[in-house]
Image (cartoon, rainbow, N blue to C red):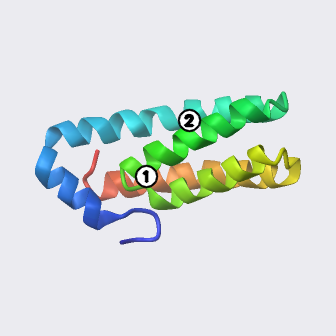
Amino acid sequence: MSALLDTTNLDAMLAMLGEDFRAIVQQYAAQLDSELRSMEQARQRQDWTLLRRLAHTLKGSSGNVGAMALAGQAAQLERAAQQADAQAADAALAALAPLISATRSALDAGGYT
């Protein structure tokens, strides 16, 4: 398992599902920027309920495709939103953009997309 990805599970899913799994990962990766924008907008509006839900969704989808570092960061954002902790939410959001880029690169480099 790399710091970003659970390659053991990714390899197993790829072996089991083949191109269908690649399509799932491609769809996941394509939605990341839009999801980040939605979370940033929710934070700007201080819509903690929406931000928590969006972070929870990102946590789950990231875990489903083996993007464990991104799932962990989304969990931090979810906790911050649940507590309406603006400072922690801002820090978690700031860490997401570079992590999304690194995750997307790792998925591409691993042949999962």
Q: Which quadrant does the C terminus fall into?
A: top left
Locate residue 40: give its quadrant. Answer: top right
Q: Position of residue 105 (x, y in %)?
A: 42, 53
Q: How many marks?
A: 2
Question: Do residues under tags 1 and 2 come within 8 Å of each other at their CB atoms?
Answer: no
Q: Position of residue 64 (x, y in %)?
A: 37, 48
Foreground residue among 47 and 24: 47
Direction from residue 113 to residue 14 in the image, left or right: left
In three-dimensional space, the C-alpha distance between marks 1 and 2, rounded to whole angstroms, equals 17 Å
Direction from residue 102 to residue 9 in the image, left or right: left
Residue at position x 30%, y 37% from top? 24
Secondary structure at badge 1 equals: helix
Disc 1 or 2, which lies upstream in sequence?
Answer: 2
Direction from residue 61 to residue 25 in the image, left or right: left
- For badge 2, the amino acid type reads Asp
Q: Nearer the viewer, mark 1 or mark 2?
A: 1
- Binning the other alpha carbons within 10 Å of mark 1 as few (below 14), some (14 to 19) or many (20 upward) gives some
Locate residue 50: give its quadrant. Answer: top right
Residue that numbered label 1 is attached to: 63
Q: Position of residue 104 (x, y in %)?
A: 44, 49
Q: Which quadrant does the N terminus fall into?
A: bottom left
Q: Position of residue 31 (x, y in %)?
A: 48, 32
Residue at position x 24%, y 42% from top? 22
Direction from residue 113 to residue 75 in the image, left or right: right
- Residue 31 drawn above or below residue 66: above
Residue at position x 53%, y 38% from top? 57
- For badge 1, the amino acid type reads Gly
Residue at position x 12%, y 50% from top? 16
Residue that numbered label 2 is attached to: 33
- Binning the other alpha carbons within 10 Å of mark 2 as few (below 14), some (14 to 19) or many (20 upward) gives some
Foreground residue among 101 and 74: 74
Secondary structure at badge 2 equals: helix
